[in-house]
Amino acid sequence: MVNSRRKNKITDDQELLQAYLQNGDLEYLADLYNRYVHLVYGVCLKYFRQREESQDAVTEIFESLIEKVRQQTIVNFKSWLYVVTKNHCLMAMRKAKTKQKQQADFFAEEFMESTSISHPIDEAHGEQVETKLRECIEKLKNEQQLCIELFYFRTQCYREIAEKLTIEEKKVKSYIQNGKRNLKICLEQKDVKHG
């Protein structure tokens, strides 16, 4: 009881930070972070444009602070936290973009017949493949498009997709199979045909 009263009396950011650094009590850091959590969430929302992803990032950033505040000299916590948040978002977006590109390349290969150099798309650079793939995905029927997007690009399983779209798992499988077939046809139409 005495402890929490003492914590509540600290009003200065630097004092809270020093209190955390001195005794490692996470309550000090949490109190400090909570003062600017709306700022952190706002920055995350600006970058991710998705509430769920932004909320996850808010938690991840707090967890990263446990060590980060010990590794750097912080003069102005609010400004420092803004930079940490921005960097976290940029890194997460960079990782997601790389993952998405790898998935798109893998995804495109899965549709194309991979017998040596049987199709010009096999020799295309990743970006070209991704662009053509995206164009083809946009032409799919809504249900197929959603299921393909969630399955390949958000790496969700049949069950998760079924729950999210409130449909049966069998339907999800069917939409993905039909979507794949339509994508293969579309990708072949966008390039020079065999022979």
Image: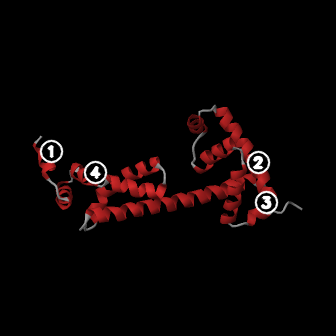
Q: Earlier in the sequence, mark 3 or mark 2?
A: 2
Is 142 drawn above or below residue 33 in the view shown?
Answer: above
Please name the amino acid that badge 4 sits on: Asn
Q: Residues within 10 Å of mark 4 (few under 14, many from 20)?
A: few
Which residue carries the number 2 mark? 182
CB atoms of marks 3 and 4 within 8 Å: no
Marks 1 and 3 sit apart, C-alpha to C-alpha, by 66 Å
Instruction: Measuring from the top left, give residue 7's x and y in whole percent.
Output: 15, 49
Q: Is residue 173 above or below residue 36?
A: above
The answer to whether residue 14 of the structure is visible from this angle is yes
**Mark linked to residue 4:** 1
**Image coords of residue 192 (percent x, y):** 83, 63
Mark 3 or mark 4: which comes first in sequence? Answer: 4
**Quick check: marks 1 and 2 in contact, CB under 8 Å?**
no
Q: Is residue 114 among the parts visible in the rendering? A: no
> Residue 21 location, x and y as percent?
20, 58
Q: Is residue 190 left or right of residue 171?
A: right
Closer to the camera: disc 4 or disc 1? 4
